[in-house]
Amino acid sequence: MNIDLVIRDAIIVSPHERTRGDLLVAEGRVAGVVASGTGQGAEVVDASGLYLLPGAVDPHVHLQDPGLTHQETFTTGTGAAAVGGVTTVVEHHRSIPFVMNVDILRDKATYLADRGLIDYALFGGAEPDNIDQLRPMWEAGAAAFKIFTCTVHGVTPVFADKMLEAFREMASFDAPVLIHCEDETILQSNAARLKAAGRKDFEVIREWRTREAEEVAVSTTALLARLTGCRVIIAHASHPTICDLVNRERALGAKIWVESCPQYFYLTEDLIDEIGPWGKFTPPARDEASRDEMWARLEAGDIDMICADHAPSTKEEKSKGLDDIWEAPFGIPGVETVYPLMLTGVNKGLTSLERLVAARSQIPAQVYGLWPRKGNLNVGADADFILVDMGAEKTLRNDDIVAKVGWTTYGGRKVKGLPVKTYVRGHLVAEDGKPVAEPGWGQFLPGPGAKN
């Protein structure tokens, strides 16, 4: 076998162990690991002192292309992902038009073919009136589906009756579905009360999008997951009680996983009360005690995945909320800052590097049907990996953000632990905070149900 690339003398990390050695790459695949200094190949990269991790698989990114390219393009978004150590994304369905049927799914896959720097799969959307389109989208290559239980981002909410129907349908072909869980009736009641009082201040966010609204929706969703056997992921869990509600149904046999995001490990409602639109996302950040406990829940395995929920809006769009918080769109950018933030937690001893690798690579790849090709460094897997300098420090700044919107909620925050090189199928796609691959290197990954 001809070895194309050798990553020499790296500390290679899996969810189970660390080993020091040389990683061998042949024809874009992992060819093996040998003792440090013994690997021979056409290209040798010295990784002494660096950690080698499987590339992150991030199934929660909104790259806004086609349709909202003033916020992000698929090229800038996948470039930002590459800089952040992400080698595969599962792009959500809320580009324009929403991916709600098989024709739109195929059109989007064709449209993106020459735009991505990293590999990608695609979501389809599930709403009350398109349940008959779920199987056709699955067979055309959708990797997963998304449901909202509330009105946000212009979607139609799915209530318990239609969720039951949709879950039964998706269980019949074993598709995963990601659920945004906030109870619409509670949110509407809260909003009506706040608007009647003339409230426009930043504290509206926490009083509107309450813990109770999230908990009620999660409870219903988790129960329906168990009753139907559907594979369900709870999106962006904001506080530890969500884990408890899920664990209750998981213990009874539900096929259910918990996703969370760095904002719930770093931000608090008090900070959101200060920064307003720059921290308007939903569910919102919670109290300090909840934030601190999220680290323990990650290490314990109660939180299965750490994802970005990259949802960029422009500075101009966000600024509309400075005088009236209702006017700001939801969402924050973040696909390139997940690893620097979470690696900082590793350096502080808040979680282990092995656990983070499981949550960023192995588990998302397994749940979203990308395993064993993605999410690991086993022989035969795609050579998707990152080199990380655990001692590197920087201050996050708007000027350094690769995402098109050019700002971060974490501006001014110091981080320690940085991806310095990112490879997709053995090809260097990002280095030292800059994307270096050409658009089109990224490949579309049809889901496991694809037939045509």
Image (cartoon, rainbow, N blue to C red):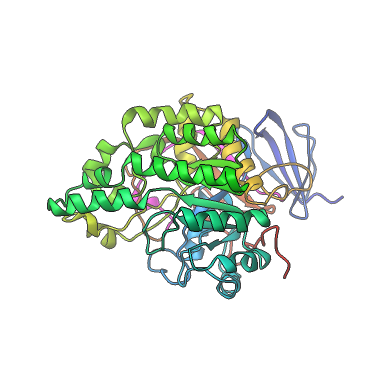
Q: Would you identify the image quadrant in which residue 389 lies?
A: top right
Q: Is residue 310 left or right of residue 33?
A: left
Q: Is residue 90 visible?
A: no
- Identify which residue is drawn at 62% across, 62% down: 142
Q: Is residue 387 magenta?
A: yes
Image coordinates of residue 82 in percent, x first then y, are 54, 52
Q: Is residue 295 above or below residue 441?
A: above
Q: Residue furthest right?
A: 1
Image coordinates of residue 178 in percent, x first then y, are 52, 51
Q: Would you identify the image quadrant in which residue 68 lies?
A: bottom left
Image coordinates of residue 168 in percent, x first then y, are 60, 55
Q: Is residue 17 visible?
A: yes
Q: Is residue 3 above or below residue 63?
A: above
Q: Is residue 239 left or right of residue 339?
A: left
Q: Nearer the viewer, residue 42 or 176?
A: 176
Residue range highlighted in magenta: 382-403
Q: Nearer the viewer, residue 55 or 395?
A: 55
Q: Is residue 205 above or below residue 19?
A: below
Image coordinates of residue 315 in percent, x first then y, are 29, 59
Q: Is residue 324 above or below residue 268?
A: below
- Identify which residue is drawn at 78% across, 43% down: 379
Q: Is residue 74 left or right of residue 380?
A: left
